[in-house]
Image (cartoon, rainbow, N blue to C red):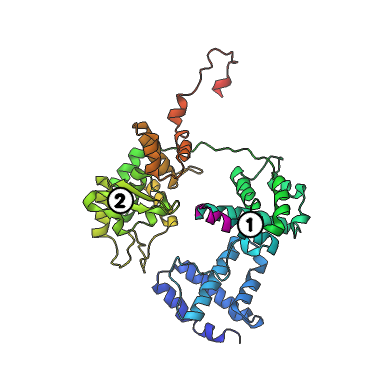
Amino acid sequence: MAFEELLESSDDLLSQMRRMGFSESYVAQVSTELRWLERHGSACESLGEACLARIEPMGGSGTARKVRSIFGLIEHFELHGGCPSPGEGHALFERGARFELLPCFQEVVDSFERVALARGMRESSVRSCVSSASTFFRALQGMGRTSFDDISERDVVSLFAGRDGAPSLSWSYKESVSMVLACGPGPWEEGAERVRTYLPPVKRARKNVQCLTAGEVALIRSALANEGARLCLRDRAVGWILLLTGLRACDIAGMLIGSVAWEFDEVRITQRKTGEPLTLPLLPVVGNAMLDYLERERPESADPHLFLSRRPPHGPVGSTCISNIASKIFDAAGVRTGDGERRGTHIFRHHAATGMVDAGVPRAVVSATLGHADPASLDRYLTADIEQLRTCALSVARYPVREGVFGR
């Protein structure tokens, strides 16, 4: 029987997963896929082939991505005799539209990546452009277009048009695709440039972002200061950092114990998004919360990261964990519990920015504190504060308005 040796040791795999801290629901999902292998694996020659057969009826759904990840974990166990740590990537196939492109489209994407990195473009920006262009090309492939000569203006416009005829894709998406097409290499340069001219005009727009009110901030501070507010010491320390510094979630997750220069009352990090160093003052309430966590709650571990998972094997937390902590803080404070209310980590960043500006801190200092590579990035923070926007409102007293308009 195919995979006989693997299936005979499946109990060992599941036991290892439990010891390493995988959730019971995930262990159950792995068990389900092992049973599928036992029933259908005889028709497949490899785990890769079995995985493709398993996900084929699922299309591109999230379930298919999860199954692919599970088969990657099973393959890791088969090759190494042990399972990877929770949170460690272990998909069986490389993910993303880029790996499904035909050679002509793949070469244009590869050419852009080489040129952009050589010019000093940030890796995160390059990845974003590559992702947008890859989904663009894959959509064209789905329409049966196999070369640049096959692509018409109608094809391109149809990808951007929504149901009402207005563009459904963003200005930034269009700009990313445009930059990639502009780097078409030799044999594809003319075709790529022609397709670039087909990109429709898209209006650049930004929505006003919700801000924390003074009342919400008071409730959050109370929850963070109260040890009985259903927040562990780690989550309280993260909360104070979010509220008072405006650090990005990825930078909080990446903080090391050595990032805190206690003798200088500073926090020193290298930003993940920009790659630039950033030094912030260590506020007393933040330092005290960190120290409480280090001395009273942080698991014994040689890992240099400051914040660790509470479950074995106590690895470093990720950005998703920081976002989950933000949600716990809102729940503990009893604010933003309604549907559709913004409650992610970025709202703390907006709060820190507007707070510094209201206190009279110069824009350049605020921008540097937030770690912006481009000072213009501060503009969206400053236009989001409803109190500031109210000062710009014009009176309608001079204009005739029918009775009842403002009563509805």
Q: Nearer the viewer, residue 149 or 213?
A: 149
Alpha carbon distance from label 2 to label 1? 38 Å
The residue singled out by tag 1 in the image is 134
Residue 351 appears in the picture as rendered: no
> In terms of depth relative to the viewer, which is nearer, 46 or 217?
46
User: Residue 85, relative to residue 80: is it above or below?
Assistant: above
Q: Quadrant of residue 84?
A: bottom left
Q: Position of residue 2 (x, y in %)?
A: 60, 85
Q: Quadrant of the C terminus?
A: top right
Q: Is residue 213 left or right of residue 291?
A: right
Assign the magenta stretch its main secondary structure.
helix
In which quadrant is the N terminus drawn? bottom right
- Residue 178: image location, x then y, percent: 64, 48
x, y percent for residue 189? 70, 54
Magenta range: 113-122
Q: Secondary structure at mark 2?
A: strand
Amino acid type for the residue under numbered disc 1 = Ser
Residue density around tag 2, few if under 14, some if 14–19, many if 20 or more, within 10 Å:
many
Q: Position of residue 123 (x, y in %)?
A: 50, 55
Whether label 2 touches label 1, CB < 8 Å: no
> Secondary structure under badge 1?
helix
What residue is drawn where x is 51% and y is 20%? 394
Find residue 267 and name its label.
2
Query: Disc 2 marks which amino acid?
Result: Val
Is residue 115 in the magenta section?
A: yes
Q: Is residue 387 left or right of residue 135?
A: left
State whether residue 296 is above or below residue 92: above
